[in-house]
Image (tube, grey):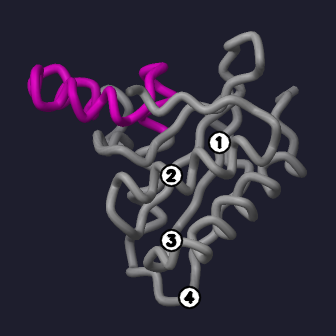
Amino acid sequence: MSELTLQTAQTIVTAALKTAREKAFKPLAIVVYDERGALKALLSEDGTSLKRAEIAMGKAYGALSLGVGSRALHKMATERPYFIAAATHAVGGQLVPVPGGVLIKDAKGRVLGSVGVSGDTSDNDEIAAAAGIEAAGLVFDAGA
């Protein structure tokens, strides 16, 4: 059974959205997966473009699949594009190697899941994801 509860996932998306509104970010899609890759929460704000949820899912699922935040995946894509292309294929196309996919960890560093955010700049997406994770009393790892 997952240790990342629905209540925790809801706290994460609510806090990420609150941060986004306070900072006047563009409309976001926010997704939370548990450590098994099971979808725990997904929301798309009014005004979010059509495929933002899928992009958020790719950021979060890619980070979870490779065990590093998507900022690190972005660096890998620049330095080793063939590896990221192969990894994208290996995970069924669900890998978006840009910031905004953040691992959720407990205080001991154990991965509990991931958050993906899409809709604003990648850096702002990452800020919203990190704020949501911190609001839940957990640790974020963006891959920096």
- Kindly identify the residue that appears in the image at 46 percent across and 42 percent down: 101
Q: Nearer the viewer, mark 3 or mark 2?
A: 2
Q: Pick whichever of labels 4 and 2 is earlier in the sequence.
A: 4
Look at mark 2 in the image and give the residue it sits on.
Answer: 127
Quarter of the rendering occupied by the C terminus? top left
Q: Amino acid at mark 4?
A: Asp
Element under disc 1: strand
Q: Nearer the viewer, mark 1 or mark 2?
A: 2
User: Horizontally, is 97 left or right of 113 in the view?
Assistant: left
Separation of marks 4 and 2 at Cα, in angstroms = 20 Å
Residue at horizontal 60 percent and vertical 77 percent from the top: 21
Q: Residue furthest bottom?
A: 47
Circle on res. 28 = 3
Q: Gap in Å between the C-alphas at discs 1 and 2?
A: 18 Å
Question: Which label's residue is closer to the chain start, 1 or 3?
Answer: 3
Q: CA distance from mark 4 to mark 3?
A: 8 Å
Q: Which residue is mark 4?
A: 46
Bounds of the magenta span?
61-89
Q: Which residue is mark 1?
A: 33
Determine contact: label 4, label 1, CB under 8 Å.
no
**How far separated are the C-alphas under marks 1 and 3?**
17 Å
Element marked by disc 2: helix
Mark 3 residue type: Leu
- Which mark, by number, is residue 49? none
Q: Is residue 1 left or right of residue 124?
A: right
Q: Give the image location of residue 108, x and y in percent.
A: 75, 10
Q: Residue 22 at what x, y percent from top left?
A: 61, 74
Q: Tell me if residue 79 is in the magenta stretch.
A: yes
* Amino acid bearing label 1: Tyr
| Residue 103, horizontal then vertical, whole percent | 57, 31
Q: Is residue 26 magenta?
A: no
Helix, strand or loop at disc 4?
A: loop
